[in-house]
Image (cartoon, coloured by chain):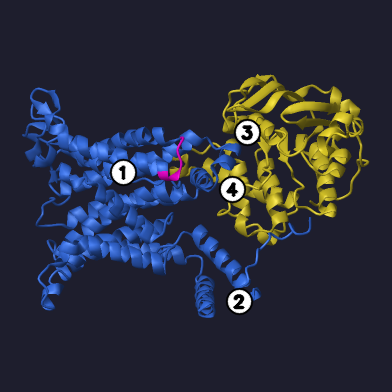
Amino acid sequence: MSGFLRRLRERERRAAAAVARRLPPWWNRALAGALIVIGIVLPFFFPPDSGFMNGTIIAVTYAVMSLGLNVVVGFAGLLDLGYVAFYALGAYSLGWFGSDFFFKLRVHVLVSPIANTLQGIHLNFILILIGAAAICAAAGMLIGLPTLRLRSDYIAIVTLAFGEIIATVAVNGQSVPVGGGMTLTAGNLGISAVDAPYFPGTGSFSLLNLRPWYWLILAILLLVLFVNLRLRDSRLGRAWVALREDEVAAVSMGIPLVKTKLLAYSVGAVFGGMAGAFFGTYYTEVNASQFAFGFSIFILAMVVIGGLGSIWGALVGGLALGYINNYLIPDVLNDLPSKFGLHFQLTQVEFGIFGFLLVIMMLLRPQGLIPERRRRLEMTAQIAAEDAQLAEAPTGEVTVILPPGEGAA
Amino acid sequence: MSAAGDPVPPAGPVPSALLAPAVLRAERITKEFGGLRAVDDVSVDLPEHSIVSLIGPNGAGKTTLFNMLTGLYRPTQGRIVLGGRDITRSRPDVITGYGVARTFQNIRLFGAMTAVENVMIGHHARMRAGLFGSIFRPPWVRREERDTRARARDLLAYVGLPQAVFDRLAAQLSYGDQRRVELARALAAEPSVLLLDEPTAGMNPRESAELTAFMRRLRDEKKLTILLIEHDMKVVMGVSERVTVLDHGRKIAEGEPAVVRTDPRVIEAYLGKQD
């Protein structure tokens, strides 16, 4: 058994090394460029109102959230179980500043001619995006503060509570007056009739033509990817990894604990808020029932399945679960059970499917689909150590490996 | 540690160094954990460009004292002064910024980072790039990043790490190499005071002797003041201008190594009382 595993790992390692040798240095840039071009022209190959386009848009939005959560959980190692809070805050930013919800007010900034005649606050989508980012950055700091003195599991508990608090406020906000007969949220009734994005000179954003929506969220995704990549290879990104690895050593080396951690929460929250604002307008409704605890776990699953701390992993994890959840299960495979004479639809058991996928992943590839470089190196180092141990130790005997040099003392 | 040549005679106390003003001074500091006094009313002076050793049996409070000097613990009583500045209540990262760097008894490297990245972390407090600098990466940030990387490589070479393992993960390095990386990481903070917590632990006599020579080189070339926790008496006697002895949290002796080693209280602390 162990011999087989060892051979398998050896083959895997050789294959990876061979690939790394074969690729010239410009390969990454060329690949990235090609992928971006494919991303941009993709909608031309599908009908503009198809289920696939809808699934793609939702999957890309999930990827934005997954990339945001990856900054907090993957880079900085702070387990956040309340990420849905930032989806909610982003969506409500859209609901507040892009609908007739605050009907006593009349504020219009750079919006479509139709929206210009309506009651309420109507800001251009870009302004709403910036507002959502600002609100979520502040909320990220707020959630960060009480967790600063906590570690791992306890951080998870506090963030979980934060997510629940925001979700509950969203539900009960319909009985919180903010003056003039207006309330904070519309609870489970939802804020509907929200503005579609409007940019002079582009096509209209309607649900019959999903292409503009797609390009908008693609632009947000590329922005978020860019920021992620820049941060990973920077002074700040290194500081996050150092804090994740060893907090005491990190602060002793001059890394300010509070500031660095709060920045991680804030950056992650900003991405979640931007995705939330987009979902708000795309779903044409901001409803408190959208912000359930399960969604936090769903995004966390994207990060974990993709590979904790890996940007490309978070991207692929977000896209994969997005497609499975919003295209594969409802549109493609939904009737599968009935073909076998079973009386249920696949959408009824989707949580079971995700649980199954997660378990399979953890068994076969615990490091994720595209593991972070560091974790990959760590894993291979561990495997090498295990292999060496297996090779040396006769069966049934336990050996202790001392670090070289220690035995000499 | 690669020490090419050793101009300073071994066991060379430099009395003049002790006349220099103290760069780091702990004034009657006490640390209590619940009812336990881990450090009890201890004062320590570090004269500029000197090497002072802190010795004592296990549990004497040496590392607790280190943790107070670097801001990880806040003293229950007393005051810590660094070059005229009161740092008693300062945060550890701020103290590092003021010029105090340390190593740890049980090496605490960032295992999932390469040797070079570990040393670059050491330089963190001397860098300026913030959130937006990191995202937009203007020319000065690129330059800072490049310079920090080059510095890190220089420092790793300085402490004698083989170039072949510069980009290997810290966790994969040999024990001796990990000690070197930790030392380079501390030096990257450009400290004026260096605190070393049992740097020769796990080293053989030859390696210990090399490190002893290297510490003198650090003091002279990098103009450092060094506070050393050490169990190896050969190293302590060979390198320190002054030795402070702790036992059960109290300072029981202080002075030149030759004097301290014959002090009956010290002998008692180490060997037990003779009836």
Q: Colour of chain B?
A: yellow
Tell whether label 1 touches label 2 (CB within 8 Å).
Answer: no
| Disc ID at residue B146 | 4
Residue at the disc numbered 1: A82
Quarter of the view holding residue A33: bottom left
Q: Is residue B53 above or below residue A301?
A: above
Q: Amino acid at mark 4?
A: Arg
- Whether labels 4 and 1 share one chain: no
What is the three-letter code of the residue carrying label 2? Thr
Inspect this view and state whether residue A380 appears: yes
Of residues A362 and B82, the one nearer the viewer is A362
The span picked out in magenta is A149-153
Of circles 2 and 1, which is in front? 2
The numbered mark 2 sits on a residue in which chain? Answer: A
Nearer the camera: disc 4 or disc 1: 1
Dot 3 corresponds to which residue? B96
Q: Residue at x 53, y 73 (%)?
A: A13
Neighbour class for label 2 at 10 Å: few (<14), some, many (≥20)?
few
Q: Secondary structure at mark 2?
A: loop
Q: CA distance from mark 3 to mark 2?
A: 50 Å
Q: Are marks 4 and 2 on the same chain?
A: no
Mark-to-mark CA distance, 4 and 1:
38 Å
Say whether marks 4 and 1 touch (CB < 8 Å).
no
Amino acid on which disc 1 is placed: Gly
Chain holding disc 1? A
Q: Which residue is mark 2?
A: A395
To which quarter of the image does residue A288 belong?
top left
